[in-house]
Amino acid sequence: MKPKMILLIATNNRHKIEELRDILIATLGDDVVELKGADAFPDVVPPEETGETFEANAIIKARAYAKATGLLTLADDSGLVVDALDGRPGVQSARYGPNSKARNERVLNEMARVPAEQRTARFVCVAALVDPKGKTQTRTGTVEGKITFSPRGDNGFGYDPIFELVEQPYVGFTTAQLTSNQKNSISHRGRALRAIAPLVSELIK
Ligand code: IMP
């Protein structure tokens, strides 16, 4: 039997690894690829995310781990882009305040005078796949919504309670009001990962 190909997911976030596992298994079957998280390589120092775009940061992460381990590596970078805030929090999404609650309050405060029709926003995720020779491919996923006037919903994480979907079939729900399966089916990350999964399958043929 052909040995399983190893795919390194350059994150310590278990939630992301599990989400990717589900998507890759649905796309590729469960017997062709073995997923490892960054925690399997504690000696690799995570790179600083100094890029000005989601794509740049996803590539920085994937290249650093691919170079250090010689493995096919996937990384993603994501965040919330709010039109009325000139794209903020953007690549600063994880650092827009000391914790999720503070970050959500900051966005709501900055949006206090913005009327409903100008509260458009999107979650964006770029997935980057780097092979051991350094060949780099990226795919982007987005989901469209608008910023609420107050938080709603207990599921999910991060900005989910203040992000109301404008896409079918969940128009009017915040992403914090969806189950994880519902969210994965429409999320920016789900879309980016489903777009990159066939590239993984090409590389491991
Ligand atoms: P990173 O991709 O792990 O760097 O995450 C960036 C930040 O964007 C997270 O810490 C969250 O604040 C935000 N973010 C990314 N994806 C989501 C999501 O699906 N829901 C809510 N917040 C998100």
Image (spheres, rainbow, N blue to C red):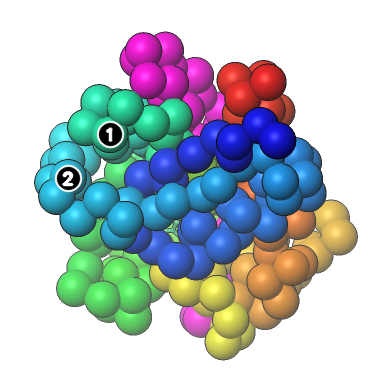
The circle on residue 154 is none
Q: Which residues are magenta?
A: 127-151
Q: Secondary structure at mark 2?
A: loop
Residue density around tag 2, few if under 14, some if 14–19, many if 20 or more, within 10 Å: some
Q: Is 15 placed left or right of 165 in the picture?
A: left
Q: Quadrant of residue 39?
A: bottom left
Q: Is 142 placed left or right of 181 in the picture?
A: left
The amino acid beneath tag 2 is: Val
Q: Is 100 placed left or right of 183 in the picture?
A: left
What residue is rendered at 55% in x and 47% in y? 34
Q: Quadrant of residue 10?
A: top left
Q: How many marks?
A: 2
- Is residue 51 in the magenta section? no
Which residue has dot 2 on it?
44
Q: Is residue 183 above or below residue 7?
A: below
Confirm or deny contact between disc 2 and disc 1 (CB under 8 A).
yes
Of the residues under marks 2 and 1, which one precedes in the sequence?
2
In percent of width and height, residue 97 lies at 21, 68
The amino acid beneath tag 1 is: Thr
Q: Is residue 132 visible?
A: yes
Query: Which residue is at the front of the view, 60 or 151?
Result: 60
Which residue has dot 1 on it?
69
Q: Residue furthest right?
A: 169
Residue density around tag 1, few if under 14, some if 14–19, many if 20 or more, within 10 Å: some
Task: Determine the main secondary structure of the stretch shown in magenta.
Answer: strand
In percent of width and height, residue 61 lies at 29, 37
Mark 2–mark 1 distance (CA, rounded to whole Å) = 8 Å
Q: Quadrant of ligand 1?
A: bottom left
What residue is rendered at 49% in x and 19% in y? 137
